[in-house]
Image (cartoon, rainbow, N blue to C red):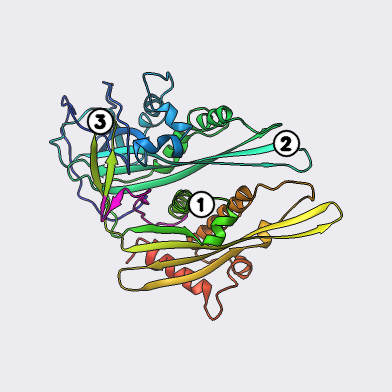
Amino acid sequence: MVSMRYIDNKFKLAGKYLLGFKVCLFSAIWVFSSVVTPLEASAGTQTVYWGGVGFSGTWQDRKSRYPATSELLDCKQNEKCLDTLAREKFAKKKFDKFSLSLEKIDRKEIDALVGVLSINNEFYGTYQDWKTKDYALIARIFGQFLVYEIGTGKIIHNVPFAIRANHISATPLTEKEKIKLFQKVMISDELGINFFDEAYNKAKQLDPTNIPGKYTKIGKFEFSKAALKSFVTTDDKLLGSKFGSFFESELVGRTDAQFVPMSIGDSEAGNKIKMTFGDGERTLTIPEPTFNVSVLVRKAQLIEKTRGKQRTICPAVAITLNVSDAMDTITNLKFAIFKDACGVTSIDQKLNMRYRYSRSLFSLLQNMAMQFGMPEPSAEWLERNAAGNKGKDVKKEIKNLNKTVFSLMF
């Protein structure tokens, strides 16, 4: 991630130990400690000290929010635990603009930078193919690589990312099989992708010596009562955090925007985020965002047409995007997906509507982020998906949004 100038600190930390230092993650972490051989830092390269891997949310939430990946936290019970795997697959890799050191540091070194991996959400979806009768199973995991100052606890860089893996099965997966699928996505090369490789791909070019001059945050991702009912759930916060995490990762990946992490649950108070550890708590400080992004899913409606035994279905989703600063609204735009969400099935097919609407919403958010990252938004896409903004020059507003909010320039 590219950003503004930061004062380069040179560290002289060889031979010191981090006794009692608790590794911190956004909203929660599980601490793993073992003595390892440090990596050699390149001359003139900023050092970031490896802090570990864990989860956002309270430790008590792990079974409900992370039923699959949380099982890999315990290094005593699991030969393939997350901290060990992270060291093998992530922490020992070479980064373009910093050296990720496994050396332990003294907490008195208040200027030292610490990097941690956080798992923010698991998201599982499934549907049955009406022709083959096979089940398509989708596992998504959302995470982020955070860099923070050890002395102040201030997060200075947030690199969010998301991975997805598909699996085809003749029958629906059991709960144990779902857990195995998620764990494959986390640690295995069998599916062609894993959590640690994707984290490295996103963080490889991060320059921690630069502090952003402005930050943006997804403050709200909400659903109307009608939309929530269509998604067949009552947990607005959990659903919102999942789609919000996805949108954040897409925006960061496709624009120059610098985002501070989304809050998970009720852990945030002001600019402080409560951190939960295996043996205690502390807080990290998030920078004050210059801009706030909020999303309201206004409507989710199935539009369908039958012809004989063939059934055309369009799980349409409509949202409102609002971006504001401390003084005023910068833009307020409506987007929807209709024709792009259509597909064909059988009249006898039982539909999993949460999956169908989720797929539509993922597609809409991804394409919105693509428009925001383009020098020239697609007029064709806007005509189909932004038709509800009468009297507004949507292309002009998106270009202004990119220049004002997502660009590094002031």
Label 3 environment density (alpha carbons within 10 Å; few <14, some 14–19, many ≥20):
few
Depicted 90 relative to depicted 233: above or below: above
Q: Residue at position x 20%, y 49% from top?
A: 7
Q: Of label 1 and label 3, which has the lower sequence position?
A: 1
User: Disc 3 designates what residue?
Assistant: 279
Res 274 → quadrant:
top left
In three-dimensional space, the C-alpha distance between marks 2 and 3, rounded to whole angstroms, equals: 45 Å
Query: Which is more foreground, mark 2 or mark 1?
Result: 1
Q: In the drawing, what numbered circle is on residue 234?
A: 1
User: Is 269 inside the magenta-drawn segment?
Assistant: yes
Lower position in the chain sequence, tag 2 or tag 1: 2
| x and y, in percent, of residue 52 in the image | 32, 32
Q: Position of residue 166 (x, y in %)?
A: 61, 37
Residue 180 on the magenta segment: no
Say which amino acid is labelled 1: Thr
Residue at mark 2 to residue at mark 1: CA–CA distance? 29 Å
Q: Classify mark 3: helix, strand or loop.
A: loop
**Majority secondary structure of magenta residues:** loop
State the image coordinates of residue 64 (x, y, percent, origin top left). 45, 38
Residue indicated by mark 2: 134
For the C terminus, the image quarter is bottom left
Q: Which residues are magenta?
A: 254-272
* Residue 93 visible somewhere in the drawing: yes
Circles 2 and 1: CB atoms closer than 8 Å: no
The residue type indicated by label 2 comes to: Asp
Which residue of the protein is positioned furthest toward the right in this rendering?
308
Evaluate whether residue 44 shows in this view: no
